[in-house]
Amino acid sequence: MPQQAWSKKRERQYENIKESLEDQGRPEKVAKEIAARTVNKNRARSGESEQASRTSTDDISSSRRGGLRSHRGAQGRTKAQLYADARKQNVKGRSSMTKAELEKAVS
């Protein structure tokens, strides 16, 4: 990883993300890649990198996106998440479906 341009803060951020992912059971190689991508995206969003893709600067933040995707409570995914999956799968009639119907359609 080209970490020489990272500040001490970004190094700590990388280590914290990597350790958290490993604690969740992710393989070390995958944890390193996700952590590096997250740190690089945060650097791009804050103007610390020389180059930045459009998605790095225009997309929602990594922490917010992770929070949206991590909903695994007693009721499972949110209706909005299910609707987005149904849209990706091109499910017909998804706009009038209930949460239960969306769950059935995307599973």
Image (cartoon, rainbow, N blue to C red):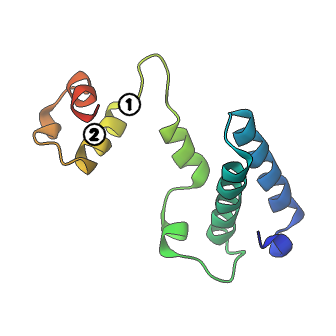
Q: Is residue 98 left or right of residue 34?
A: left
In the depicted view, which residue is nearer to us: 76 or 22?
22
- Residue 35: image x %, image y %? 70, 54
- Residue 90: image x %, image y %? 18, 48
Query: N-terminal of the two: label 1 or label 2?
Result: 1
Amino acid found under the numbered disc labelled 1? Thr
At x 55%, y 40%, the residue is: 67
Relative to 91, residue 75 above or below: above
Q: Which residue occupies the extreme bottom position in the image?
A: 50
Which quadrant holds residue 22? Answer: top right
Q: Quadrant of the N terminus?
A: bottom right
Which quadrant holds residue 12? Answer: bottom right
Q: Is residue 14 left or right of residue 55?
A: right
Which quadrant holds residue 38? Answer: bottom right
Amino acid found under the numbered disc labelled 2? Tyr
Pointer 2 residue: 83
Q: Quadrant of the C terminus?
A: top left
Q: Which residue occupies the extreme top position in the image?
A: 74
- Crowd tier of the residue under label 1, counting other residues whose Cα lies within 10 Å: few below 14, some 14–19, many 20 or above: some
At x 20%, y 25%, the residue is: 101
- Residue 106: image x %, image y %? 26, 35
Relative to 78, residue 67 above or below: below
Marks 1 and 2 sit apart, C-alpha to C-alpha, by 9 Å
At x 56%, y 55%, the residue is: 61
Pointer 1 residue: 78
Task: Name the secondary structure under disc 1.
Answer: loop
